[in-house]
Image (cartoon, helix red, strand yellow):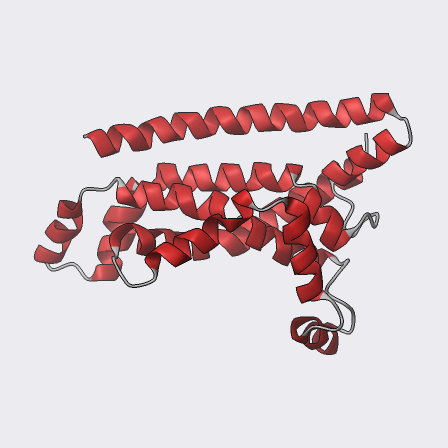
């Protein structure tokens, strides 16, 4: 068992959640309750990582993070090292790739809330931020929890983008999925099987939690 790779994957997942969830709550609520010009294009852009092959996404991110790109040059001037094939580059790629897994469940969670709840809060004199914090956020928590579970689980299992952007640097970018691939390449079927079983169990647990939370969102929408 390559526990260092699992620790790196868990760290990547936690950092991805920390950076992505606040943005996803804001964007998910915006898409759920507001109608504005260009909304469809934003929803399409958020969903793009779901339909593009991971190697295609990884290729474009590698170009964007490379030393020849403005972002790559700015990061190298700031941090003193390249963005591609680093944990920071891997984290930024993970945030972008996990956008649909975070935004869409949160959007569904806020869309399930009856509009009369916001209207009642406004009529009672509550400020919009207070209505969001004390009324909407507690009721939309199944969608937010679903987003957190899906994002973390997807981060643990992501392979194509991780390989393209981060490679397989031990302690830096070698995640559990990459470690499994390396074990298979080395004909270590036992090691690959053990690590795959851990990821399989994690995925089954994540799907079970997601289905449970999704049913709660559905019951709330029906009610």
Q: Quadrant of the N terminus?
A: top right
Q: From the viewer's perspective, is residue 13 above or below residue 192?
A: below
Q: Nearer the viewer, residue 108 or 208?
A: 108
Regarding residue 154, the answer to whether it shows in the image is yes
For image coordinates 23% across by 47% down, the residue present is: 135
Q: Position of residue 16 (x, y in %)?
A: 58, 51
Farthest residue to the right: give it: 186
Residue 124, percent across and down? 9, 55
User: Can see residue 26?
Assistant: no
Residue 108: image location, x then y, percent? 33, 41
* 190 left or right, relative to 83: right
Tell which of 66 and 13 is nearer to you. Answer: 66
Who is closer to the viewer here, 11 or 66?
A: 66
Residue 72 placement: quadrant: bottom right
Tell me what residue is drawn at x 28 percent, y 41 percent: 139
Q: Residue at x 31, y 47 (%)?
A: 137
Q: In the rendered image, which quarter contains the C terminus?
A: top left
Q: Position of 36 compared to 178: left or right?
A: left
How many numbered marks are there? 0
Q: Position of residue 207 (x, y in %)?
A: 51, 27
Position of residue 143 relative to residue 56, above or below, is above
**Relative to residue 221, is residue 160 drawn left or right?**
right
What residue do we see at 80% from left, 27% from top? 192
Residue closer to the observer: 184 or 5: 184
């Amino acid at each position: 068992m390559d526990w260092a790779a699992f620790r790196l994957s868990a760290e990547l997942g936690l950092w991805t959640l920390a950076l992505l969830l606040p943005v996803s709550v804001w964007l998910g609520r915006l898409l759920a309750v507001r109608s504005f010009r260009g909304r469809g294009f934003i929803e399409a852009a958020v969903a793009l990582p779901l339909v593009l092959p991971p190697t295609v996404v990884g290729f474009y991110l590698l170009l964007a993070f490379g030393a020849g790109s403005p972002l790559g040059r700015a990061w190298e001037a700031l941090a003193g090292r390249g963005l591609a094939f680093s944990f920071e580059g891997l984290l930024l790629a993970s945030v972008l790739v996990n956008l649909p897994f975070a935004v869409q469940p949160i959007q569904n969670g806020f869309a399930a809330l009856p509009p009369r709840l916001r209207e009642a809060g406004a009529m009672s004199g509550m400020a919009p931020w207070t209505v969001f914090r004390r009324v909407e956020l507690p009721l939309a928590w199944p969608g937010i929890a679903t987003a957190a579970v899906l994002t973390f689980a997807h981060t643990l299992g992501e392979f194509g983008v991780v390989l393209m952007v981060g490679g397989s640097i031990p302690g830096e970018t070698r995640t559990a999925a990459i470690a499994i691939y390396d074990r298979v390449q080395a004909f270590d079927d036992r090691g690959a099987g053990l690590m795959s079983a851990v990821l399989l169990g994690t995925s089954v647990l994540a799907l079970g939690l997601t289905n449970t939370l999704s049913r709660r969102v559905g019951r709330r929408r029906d009610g």
